[in-house]
Every structure is written in structure tokens, then in C-alpha cells.
Amino acid sequence: MKRLILILFLATTLHAQLTAIKARRMFDGRSDTLHENAVVVVENGRIVSVGNTVPPNAKLIDLGDRTLLPGLIDCHTHIALHSGDYDAQILRETPEFRTIVATINGRKTLDAGVTTIRDLGNEGAGYADIALRDAVAKGLVDAPRVIAAIRPVTSTGGYRLTGYSPYNPMPPLSSPADGVGEVRREVRKLIADGADVIKIYMESYEKKQAHNAEMLSGAENYSQEEINALVEEAHRGGAKVAAHTYSDHAAHMAIDGGVDSIEHGLYLKEETFRAMAQKGIVYVPTLMVYEFWRDGVIFGTPDAATKARLTRTCDEHAATFRRALATPVKIAFGSDTFEKPGTNPIELEYMAKYGMKNADVLRAATSNAAALVGVDAGTIEAGKLADLIAVDGNPMVDMKVIEKVTFVMREGKVVRQ
């Protein structure tokens, strides 16, 4: 018996070997300044201490003249979507195939320094996000941990493939639900099926005249009563609500309903952001995807009219983002990336480009994002999950170095070095 206890003790001791990560600079997820010559000690997937001394019994990972940061948390992704013909992947590819795509995209995203994603729907991919989430949790694949929505909720006809004969059954891109009763039922079903977060489409896509220019906007999908019911049911089930919103009026409906985040928010006013701040509602701007769309990085090169429209959209979105910066609203990182997996951190460069201080940008991608998605990460401090990345250079000086990820650790496991 004593021998068995000794064997178990030795096995536990060997398994729990300390790892010390040393770097010239460190951003802790909260501070305005960097810590110099930092040493972060990790054991059993968690941070046990932060200081300047390497314990004598620790395995040392010396990152040299690099900056250590918490793993990035992307609050708006679509991990099972990919580049190419959008309609073709939905109509011709099976959910099983797209789950494999999600696994590949997940690895690229992790290598880019993103250790957690909140995935907000994959449009016909079934339960690919749930499958990836569970595989990551079981250690079967290396990818970010996943906070999954499965499918967004919208009104009938509010979000679907268009341009096809109504006689042809189309794969569902969302969960149609009309009226208070159906909305409650659909939220309950999604949570029962494993959804961690509920996404609601506040508007459907259409071209609309606004500010004397054609801009992305849409018809509102839900009444205030339906929105209130959705949020109440989601919160009752322990899930937060992400509201896909473009117009200022739709944003106010979402705010009145008590959602947890506004996604995109292309045309919001300063007073709207102040109302969000008062209620603790987070803004996830997703600047990058519209810039990529305009510049032909995704969906191919747009024609002249479309590019002009998208240019106006990007200009107004940037102005909206600057209005948000003039208020105390919390902002969190969300790339909305789907055509270019692994480019997620470029969103942080756009946030800095449009006036956000570099320290605030980094907080948006770490501690702010962690609070929104509900993960025990996002800061470098004792007790937190050991999600750590390192970049060449100093992101407080130049945000472009956020693309130069050279080291990734997720829950104490080194996945890139």
C-alpha cells in the first residue's frame, strides 16, 4: 500500500512539473505599461506565479527579446466557413466536411495567437462548432477553445440564401422563430443542444438609402416583446446574447432588451454607446471584415458601384468606432473572419488605426474579451488559465507586431514555439 502511494505521488509530481516562461517584456492584460524581464510560472495548465525569478526546479522557456501576452480572445468568428464560392459551400458541402474545415481553420487561428473564440454561427454547417469545441476540450485537436452559438435566431425569411426558386429547399442558415412563444422555444432548444451563447439577428440584409448614400442596413426582424423574451430565456439558461446590429434604432431595441453585446454596430450614435455603457453592454465592432470586403480580400474584387458603397460603409463604420471611443463603453475584439483564418489579429491593427490606444486595444483582445465570453483567462496572474502568447517586438509601440506570433501556449500546453 505504501509503495502504491509512493508511485502515485511520484507520478503526480512528474506530471505537475513547473514550467517558467521568461520574456523581455510582458503585458498582463490590464496595465497601461509593460512589465520588464517577466517570469510566468505554470503548473497543471494554470499560472501559479508572476515575477522575475525562475524557480530552481522549473523547466525554462526563454523567449528572449519578445513580448509575452495573454492569449487573444476573438469574440466573433465563423470557424466552419471558408474561402471560395459562398453558396457552393452551403449547398454542396456536407456538415462533416465543414467540420474538418473548422478543425484546419482552428489550427490556423491558434497559431495566430488566438486561444479562445466565440463562434457565432456557420450557416449550414450543422453542429460543427460544437464538435470542434468538444474535441478541443478533450485534447483531440489543437485549436482555440470554443464558445459556440450553433445557429443564430432570426425571423422567418430574415436570413437565408436568396436568388433561388422558392420550390427548392435551402439549408438553414439560422433558426427561424416568430412570436414570443417560438422565440422562447428556439432558445431553449439551442441551449439544450449545447449552445453556450445565443446570437440574434436584429436586422436582415437589404440595400437601403441612408444618409443620402446606399449603405448596408436592413429591415428589423423582431418586435421589442420578442427581443425581451429571447434575452430573458437565454439568461435563464445561463447563456449570454450577442446581437447582430447595424442601425441605431435596432441597437436601442437590443439595449432595451438587455443583450450582452452589440456586434458590428455600423451606424450607432454616441448617445447609443453611452446607453450601452450604462447597462454594461459590450461593443464588438468587427472593422476588418468590411475593409477586406471592400478591398477584394474576401468575395473577390467588387465592381465599381459595390466598392463605392463599401467605401462609404467603411468610412461610416470607422466614424462610429471613433464615437464609441469618446464614451466609456467597453469594447471587445471580434474579427468576423471566415475567409482568411489566422488573420484575426489584423482587426487589432484597424482598431489602433482608427484611434484606440494600443493598451486599450490589447485589453479589448484579452481582459475585456474574457469578461464578455466568460472564460477564466485574459490576464496573466496567479490562478488564471495558462493561455500565453509571445510576439516579436513591442505592441505598445507598433500594433503590427501582433501578427508576428512566435509562441503559443494554451492551458499550459505549448502548441507553437
Image (cartoon, rainbow, N blue to C red):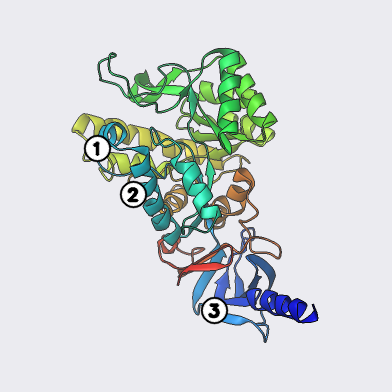
Q: Which mark is residue 110?
A: none
Name the quarter where the C terminus is drawn: bottom left
Structural distance between the alpha carbons of marks 2 and 3: 31 Å
Name the quarter where the N terminus is drawn: bottom right
Q: Residues within 10 Å of mark 1 (few under 14, many from 20)?
A: few
Residue bearing mark 3: 61
Residue bearing mark 1: 85
Structural distance between the alpha carbons of marks 3 and 1: 43 Å
Whichever of labels 3 and 1 marks the residue nearer the N terminus, that label is: 3
Asked if residue 117 shows in the view, the reply is no
Asked if residue 166 shows in the view, the reply is yes
Q: Is residue 107 left or right of residue 295?
A: right
Q: Amino acid at mark 3?
A: Ile
Task: In this rendered view, identify the residue nearer to me: 8 or 226.
Answer: 8
Classify mark 1: helix, strand or loop.
Answer: loop
Say which residue appears at 47% left-offset and 42% top-offset: 129
Structural distance between the alpha carbons of marks 2 and 1: 14 Å
State yes or no: discs 2 and 3 in contact (Cβ < 8 Å): no
Looking at the image, which residue sits at the far right?
A: 2
Residue 312 on image: x %, y %: 33, 32
Q: Is residue 58 left or right of residue 355?
A: right
Q: Amino acid at mark 2?
A: Lys
Q: Amino acid at mark 1?
A: Asp
Task: In this rendered view, identify the residue nearer to me: 269 or 150.
Answer: 150
Residue bearing mark 2: 340
Task: In this rendered view, identify the residue nearer to me: 170 or 64.
Answer: 170
Say which residue appears at 48% left-offset and 45% top-offset: 131
State yes or no: discs 3 and 1 in contact (Cβ < 8 Å): no
